[in-house]
Structures are given as structure tokens and as C-alpha cells.
Image: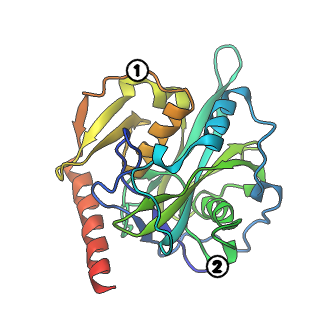
Amino acid sequence: MAAAERGKQESTGDAGTDTGTGTGIGSGSGGEQDGAVPAQTDSARIARDGLPDWLLPIRDAAERLEPQQLSRFLPPAEGGRRSAVLVLFGETRADQVGNGVPDLLLIERARSLRSHAGQPSFPGGALDEEDGDPLGPGPVNAALREAWEETGLDPAGVQVFGVLPDLYIPVSNFVVTPVLGWWRSPSPVAPVDQAEVAAVFRVPLAELADPERRARLRHPSGFRGPAFLVEGRLVWGFTAGLIDRILHHGGLEQPWDTSREIELSEDAVFLATADRDRARRRDATA
């Protein structure tokens, strides 16, 4: 199995994903686990029933969303480098009345990566030939495979309940398919390869929707997009943009101060700028 490429991209929040500062899916150099990928049986099929009540509005929204409601950039009629991310919803620790707390699984990419270094993101990466038809089961298989390779997640415990429209990242020519999953049977997760994934963490949806944790990120390039301050991390770029749209269309968004802006840290600016410059050099020599 070839080592998978990783990554995501920027977002505006108001109009969906944006190319902004230009980070795309980067080339991974490892991250594979020993042995065969777990068999993808039922979890590789889309099953819309049997979800918790709180997830139904997100499922229903996903089934009716048009690409323009997620992004201003639409995939080209032909071409583009195919990739997928796993947007995995679960339930973690019980609240005061014993109910599970809805959450999302995220990873923090290693700072040593050539692309998207140090940024929180969804598990995911480029399609491999073994994943199958990019217009068929390929994106679902790739999203589950990448999540297994990066976090040790058992794909058999994931119920795929939807697939969002493809999103396009012009600066890297990536066509990204967000695959929606319900973590029906949670399994232990942790970074499989510290050279690629620095951390694996779960973020309650209530924290992501909390107005006090929301802001718009301002990049020195002029890019502005949604950001979330959760779990001691700044979630921005493609991941924040997609979360923003999911909260909005899934009816979970709360009124928040959209005039609140934060500036990307100098360290993160350096990583993002290096990522953009690498993409431009690659395109110039293609």
C-alpha cells in the first residue's frame, strides 16, 4: 500500500471552503500500520437508519445540501486529485443526567509534515488504487482506511450515514469528499505514527457551537475564515470551515460575534506559508 497523502484547505465560513492561504493535501511519508487493513464490510456501505436523535438533523441536511452551500469552488468536470476525510461523530463521557455527549474526532498533524503541519484536521488523505472507484466506494473506503492508518480506529465500528458533495481546493487541485460517520462502537484511538499525527482528540459539539469559543481568523495574506478555540487548540482552515457549515445546516449553530477576530500565530503563519509555497513550486514544475 502506498503511503497516503494528507491534508485539507482553508474556509470562509460564510460561503464554505476557500483557498485562502493555500494549504492542500500533502504527501505523507508513512503512517501505515503493519498488517492488512481491516475488512470493510457493513461500514463501507451508507446506512442512514439507526442513528441517535441528535444526529438526524445533520443526516437530513447532508442529504439535501448542494455543493454551493458548502463552497464557492466546485470541482472541475475532469481531473483533480481525489481524496477523502472522515467526519466522525460519536458520544463520549455522560453528562450530569447520564446522557452521552455528542462529539467529533479530530487529529493534530505532526509539525514535521511537508503539508498542513501542526494543524488540527479530520482524519483523511488521498485515495489509493485499492480503495476502488473514486465515483463509487472509493471515498468511503479511503476515509475509513486513512482513519485506521492515522488513529488505529476500527472501521467495523463506524456506520457511514452520508457523503457530502465534493469540495475543490484549486491551489492543490484536490477534490475532497467528506464522509460522514457515526461511531456506533467506539474503539481505542491514538497516534499510530508520531511522525505524521501528533495527537488524536475528541471535541464535544457543544464546545464547537459555544459562541465564546468561536472567532474569525485573520491571516496576514488577507484571508479570513471561521476558527474554533477548543481543547487548547486553534482549529482553522478547511476543517473549521466544514465544521462551521455542518453546525449551520445541521441546526446546531448559535448566534456568535462574527466581528471577533484573532490573528494566526507567527508560528502557524510560518507553517501555512511554507505549505503554500511548496504547492506553488510543485504546480510550477508540473
Side of 135 relative to 236 (left or right)? right
Please tell me which of labels 2 and 1 falls first in the chain: 2
Side of 191 relative to 255 (left or right)? right
* C-alpha span from label 2 to label 1: 43 Å
Q: Residue 92: x and y, percent?
A: 65, 33
Quarter holding the C terminus? Answer: bottom left
Q: Is residue 145 above or below residue 209?
A: below
- Residue shown at 31% from the left, 42% from the top: 225
**Residue 195 in view:** no
Q: How is the image coloured?
A: rainbow
Q: Nearer the viewer, residue 149 or 160?
A: 160
Quarter of the image where one finds residue 258: top left
- Residue shown at 62% from the left, 31% from the top: 102
Q: Nearer the viewer, residue 86 or 77?
A: 77
Q: Residues within 10 Å of mark 1 (few under 14, many from 20)?
A: few
Q: Secondary structure at mark 2?
A: helix
Residue farthest front in this picture: 77
Residue type highlighted by circle 1: Pro
Residue type highlighted by circle 2: Glu
Q: Is residue 261 above or below residue 126?
A: above
Quarter holding the N terminus? Answer: bottom right
Quarter of the image where one finds residue 38: bottom right
Number of numbered callouts drawn? 2
Identify the residue position indicated by label 2 in the image: 129
Tell me, for residue 255, which label it has, or none: 1
**Residue 108 in view:** yes
Residue farthest top in this picture: 97
Q: Secondary structure at mark 1?
A: loop
